[in-house]
């Protein structure tokens, strides 16, 4: 077996792909389920918007550290040996969220979620590509990306609906998440993902992910668009509820959760609708979406119109989705199987670290300067940097017209001649 021990595509391959993708979806649903509850926790525990961004940053910090290990561990020991413990860690985080009584417990729960997410974005998403086989990498890279953003949108939607439907929202939100994770754990147990035959001995101690020199440009191009888009969605998730309260006067958890859900549905829909575009065009549209999202954020504060906040969420979702799809597509097509999980880790570290720094800085700037100056500074910084990086990524990938394979009709040979060989 190669690439983590995936079985070749065949009978039941579609069901195996669904089970592998569901693990990614379930863990990401947990990661964003707290979004509509942050207003409730702020009121009950009395912490500031700056503290709220620290809760979010704890998740990103834990995920970043996990990515220093998880990708190489999955390439060395096999995907399942890494992903199954990640699902168990996510279950522990859900229980901790359910019983949290203070800010420290929320931070601890977010740390555990960060570990679980770091595992599934490297090992779990690589497993989806592996299970599809070499001939389906275009499709399975999109499936892995959609599994991530669909879960990220499902979490806040479930959280917002449950919040409105019960007077014990925290217990029931995470009870639903526990059920989703248990289903994922049962489904993953029987997947044909064994240990690679040439696994190196020893523990993969933390270090920055390394990819072959020929692939570094692919990772850099993906990160140049994925990182600004991810920063935009991170802003909506961490400071969106506070923005709705302070700027729009609306503290509805259903609106906060619904906006986050719409954001990730936009990420899913943009990938499905634009899947046949070249990577360069995906990057161009992702960059434009980041800029438009930041413009809409500033207009939300100026006009105090929640509809503009939803528009900013939609553009942010499109930015992250298209940047992520382009980056994963480059990895699926150009990185060898036994380095794919580590390459996924490199892409995500390049995206999540800038998102963490800018989001936390903005949270504390809101407390020090006020909403308008802080958010305007973030929006301007992200729009300018995102535009420049996106332009560089577009130019770097402009020569690579990576499209899904199309069924082409071969010319009929003249009578009496053998048929032409199939193109390789």
Image: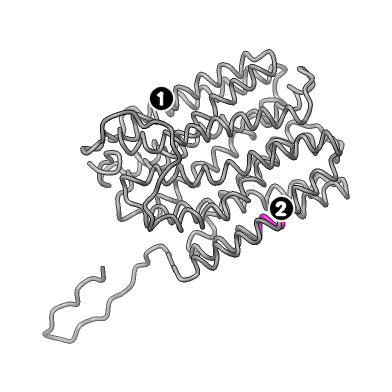
Residue 240 vs residue 395, the one in the foreground: 395
Rendered residue at 39%/30% (across/down): 205
Q: Secondary structure at mark 1?
A: helix
Q: Earlier in the sequence, mark 2 or mark 1?
A: 1
Q: Is residue 184 above or below residue 420?
A: above
**Residue shown at the point (70%, 20%) measured from the top left:** 166
State the residue position of label 1.
85
Say whether marks 2 and 1 touch (CB < 8 Å). no
Q: Split into 4 quadrants, where in the image is the N terminus?
A: top left
Image mark count: 2
* Secondary structure under the numbered disc 2 in the rendered image: helix
Q: Is residue 347 left or right of residue 375?
A: left
Q: Which residues are magenta?
A: 289-294
Q: Quadrant of residue 244?
A: top right
**Which quadrant of the view contains residue 86?**
top left
| Magenta stretch secondary structure, dominant | helix
Residue to which mark 2 is pinned: 293
114 w.r.t. 356: above or below: above
Q: Badge 2: few (under 14), some or many (20 or more) residues near its Cα, within 10 Å?
A: many
Q: Position of residue 272 (x, y in %)?
A: 52, 55
Residue 35, percent from left and from top: 67, 31
Residue at 43%, 32% in the rendered image: 206
Q: Residues within 10 Å of mark 1 (few under 14, many from 20)?
A: some
Q: Is residue 385 magenta?
A: no
Can you give x and y, in whole percent of width and height, for residue 327 in the image?
48, 53
Q: Nearer the viewer, residue 217 or 154?
A: 217
Q: For the C terminus, give its image quadrant.
A: bottom left
The disc at residue 173 is none
């Amino acid at each position: 077996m190669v690439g983590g021990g995936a079985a070749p595509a065949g009978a039941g391959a579609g069901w195996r792909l669904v089970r592998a993708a569901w693990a990614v979806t379930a863990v990401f649903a947990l990661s964003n389920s707290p979004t509509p509850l942050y207003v409730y926790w702020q009121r009950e525990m009395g912490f500031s918007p700056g503290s709220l961004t620290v809760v979010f940053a704890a998740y990103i910090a834990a995920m970043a550290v996990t990515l220093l290990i998880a990708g190489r561990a999955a390439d060395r020991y096999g995907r399942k040996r890494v992903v199954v413990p990640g699902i168990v860690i996510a279950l522990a985080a859900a229980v901790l969220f359910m019983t949290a009584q203070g800010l420290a417990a929320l931070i601890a729960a977010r740390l555990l979620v960060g570990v679980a997410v770091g595992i599934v974005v490297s090992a779990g998403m690589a497993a989806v590509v592996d299970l599809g086989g070499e001939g389906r990498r275009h499709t399975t890279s999109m499936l892995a990306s959609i599994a991530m953003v669909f879960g990220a949108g499902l979490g806040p939607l479930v959280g917002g609906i449950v919040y409105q439907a019960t007077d014990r929202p925290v217990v029931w939100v995470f009870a639903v998440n526990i059920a989703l994770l248990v289903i994922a754990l049962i489904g993953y147990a029987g997947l044909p993902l064994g240990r690679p035959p040439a696994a190196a001995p020893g523990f993969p101690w933390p270090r920055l992910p390394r990819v072959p020199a020929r692939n570094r440009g692919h990772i850099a191009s993906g990160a140049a668009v994925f990182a600004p888009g991810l920063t935009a969605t991170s802003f909506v998730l961490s400071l969106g509820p506070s923005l709705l309260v302070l700027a729009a006067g609306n503290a509805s958890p259903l609106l906060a959760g619904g906006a986050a859900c719409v954001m990730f549905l936009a990420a899913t829909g943009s990938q499905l609708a634009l899947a046949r575009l070249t990577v360069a065009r995906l990057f161009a549209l992702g960059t434009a979406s980041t800029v438009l999202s930041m413009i809409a954020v500033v207009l939300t504060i100026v006009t105090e119109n929640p509809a503009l906040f939803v528009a900013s969420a939609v553009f942010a979702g499109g930015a992250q989705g298209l940047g992520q799809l382009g980056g994963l597509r480059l990895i699926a097509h150009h990185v060898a199987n036994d380095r794919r999980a580590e390459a996924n880790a490199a892409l995500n570290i390049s995206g999540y670290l800038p998102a963490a720094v800018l989001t936390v800085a903005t949270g504390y700037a809101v407390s020090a300067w006020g909403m308008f100056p802080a958010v305007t500074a973030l929006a301007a910084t992200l729009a300018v940097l995102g535009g420049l990086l996106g332009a560089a990524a577009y130019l770097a990938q402009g020569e690579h017209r990576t499209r899904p394979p199309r069924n082409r009709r071969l010319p009929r040979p003249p009578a009496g001649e053998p048929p032409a060989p199939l193109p390789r």
